[in-house]
Amino acid sequence: MKILYGTGNIAKINSMKNMLRNLEIEIISLNDVNLKVEKIYENGNSPLENAKIKAFAYYKVWGKPVFSCDSALYIDRMDFYHQPGVHVRRINGGELNDEEMIKYYTELASKAGGEVKAKYKNAICLILDEKKVFEYDGNDIAEEFIITSEPHKKRKRGFPLDSISKDIKAGKYYMDLPYYTESQKNMINGFRDFFISSLAL
């Protein structure tokens, strides 16, 4: 089955393709179908609300199976009102580019002593047709990791925080790991289970 991934982030598209490898799903991008969509305002208060906003916006234009995802970032020992939440890039009224994100979050880690535990709360909304809408934001598609104040020299376009993320168990930078972390494996299995269940694969 062909399913449009409603995002303009190529890194996210490639990541999802890898996660769903060997399933009977062909992920296609906006570029693949030359689909133009007006700016989508992600004004939800949770990852699931934003995932639904995006998925329905793309489905309105595309009219065929589509899904969108969204994430919220929560940092240990940070009070609720200062949590990034769904505003991972949108800080103080502006939208940060990749390098600005790295600078902002390394400063947060520095204030916390150099390293701090963090968690991505992820959500997905899949629309097959007007009557078949599936959504999910369970803990099995979340991801836990460490944010460090010392950026890795490598960069991954579209995933800037990977340069300052470390595996909790190994203590190694994501950029240096030749394998998925335990938390990432759980997340991948969670996404795969969602599609297998929703599509009866």
Image (spheres, grey):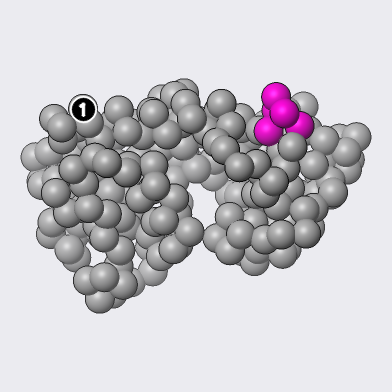
Looking at the image, can residue 85 be seen? no
Where 175 falls versus 137 (above or below)?
Answer: below
Mark 1 = which residue? Answer: 197
In the depicted view, which residue is nearer to us: 57 or 196? 196
Residue 44 placement, left or right of 20? right
Q: Position of residue 152 (x, y in %)?
A: 77, 53
Q: Position of residue 80 (x, y in %)?
A: 68, 31
Q: Secondary structure at mark 1?
A: helix
Q: Position of residue 70 (x, y in %)?
A: 44, 45
Residue at (36, 34) in percent of width and height: 191
Residue 29 placement, left or right of 89? left
The quarter of the displayed image where residue 83 is located: top right
Residue at (39, 56) in percent of width and height: 13
Residue at (84, 46) in percent of width and height: 149
Let me know if residue 156 is in the magenta part. no
**Residue at the extreme front:** 178
Q: Position of residue 162 (x, y in %)?
A: 65, 49
Q: State the quadrant of the C terminus.
A: top left
Q: How many numbered discs, if any?
A: 1
Where 21 falls versus 12 (above or below)?
Answer: above
The chief SS type of the magenta part is: loop
Looking at the image, can residue 178 be seen? yes
Residue 28 placement, left or right of 148? left
**Residue type marked 1:** Ser
In the depicted view, which residue is nearer to us: 29 or 170? 170
Residue at (39, 42) in percent of width and height: 19
Residue 92 placement, left or right of 130? right
Region in magenta = 167-171
